[in-house]
Amino acid sequence: MFLFVLLFMGACTTTSADDLMVAETQKIAEEATLPLIQLEYVHKKHTLSFELSQIDSVPASANSSTVFQAASLSKPVFAYIVLRMLDKGSIDLDAPVATYTDVDRFENKEWAWRITPRMVLSHRTGLYNWAAGPSGDAWPTSKISFLYEPDSIFSYSGEAFAFLQRAVENIEGKSLQEIAEREVFVPFDMPNTSYGWKENYTLIAADGYNREGGNAGKYRYARESSAYTLRTSAKEYSRFIKNALIDGVGLKPETHRLMLTPTGVAQRNKIERPYDKQITWGLGIGIEHNEELGDIYHHWGDNGNFKALFVIAPKVEKYLVYFTNSRKGHDIIDELLPVYFHNTKPLTLSEWISNDDFGY
């Protein structure tokens, strides 16, 4: 399995340093018993892209074409779409989201009217992560309640993204997928990326595996969600990172800077934890200041049996995105990142992710 992948990569002009990074990644993934890991790493103009299998029954694709659930890596794509709308004048970041859609499901409608797109993208709405399981039959009519007063504290919320998604779809008169195709997937050459199910996913989408190694299947979600239903590959998501997040293609320079500007400490549940003070949030993206790497931009994805992460370090002109189809996919962060970024201390984002307590 490993030799096959290296042979494919050799056709893409790899270096001995690349081979060492791939070998170290293979070792880390094998120790974690991850069925698949798919990764793309970019340093200046050099790109390393590969997919590795650790289980004979789950072979790696020959051209890194397997599609994974991106989970919350869905959110930066949606944030970019909203900022594109801002530049076009079709949405106001500081107008109530309720200007564009209803608040029927909210228990506290007065507070619901205070939620703005800026609060949604910076996770300051005060909402729970979800009112109910977002893929369940009960979710569309579930009552939405608040953990905190809007704009008072960081409160990570997929429910808030769903609220803003309804507003965006109303403004555009199109579905999330149709909007994303126009604004992101077509311009950035992402043909196998989608918020909804594509027919070819039957063949190219990865199955997810639980912590015991049991196959939990591909899972087909009931509805498109800006918060978690994106499926993609490392190569395609890397194009989004490069174009949208790093170069700001399609955004005004001031809007691109706004996306990457901290809005406040990402401290959750009013419990002071040392690592929270190192994490801030922009608009749709996490930010950490690191003594070695400078400001780094990141987002993780967690759909249970699928884990993903991207890290951008502009100071050293590097970024990385990886996908796994295992519930253990975030166990490797502290070992994997130094292979590529050469940081001597673990990044705070690892502890922050591993101690998440978002819930419903």
Image (spheres, rainbow, N blue to C red):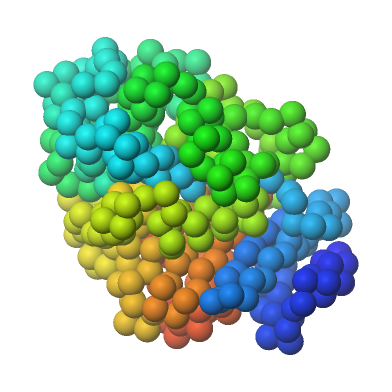
Q: Is residue 281 visible?
A: no
Q: Residue at x 13, y 43 (%)?
A: 152
Q: Residue at x 24, y 59 (%)?
A: 262
| Residue 219, picture quadrant | top right
Q: Is residue 342 visible?
A: yes
| Residue 296, picture quadrant | bottom left
In-front residue for pair 171/107? 171
Q: Quadrant of the C terminus?
A: top left
In the image, taking residue 247 as reference, residue 214 lies left or right, namely right
Q: Residue at x 22, y 38 (%)?
A: 93
Q: Is residue 23 above or below residue 153?
A: below
Q: Is residue 20 above or below residue 34?
A: below
In the image, taking residue 360 as reference, residue 92 lies left or right, namely left
Task: Give how far across and how far down residue 288 sits, in percent.
Answer: 32, 67
In the image, taking residue 150 as reference, residue 216 lies left or right, namely right
Q: How many marks?
A: 0
Q: Is residue 92 above or below residue 245?
A: above
In the image, taking residue 197 as reference, residue 56 lies left or right, namely right
Q: Residue at x 60, y 36 (%)?
A: 194
Q: Quadrant of the N terminus?
A: bottom right
Task: Give how far across and how far down residue 104 sits, in percent.
Answer: 26, 12
Task: Give how far across and how far down residue 352 sits, in percent.
Answer: 36, 60
In-front residue for pair 213/319? 319
| Residue 27, picture quadrant | bottom right
Task: Give how far across and how far down residue 232 sits, in percent.
Answer: 62, 45
In-front residue for pair 82/61? 82
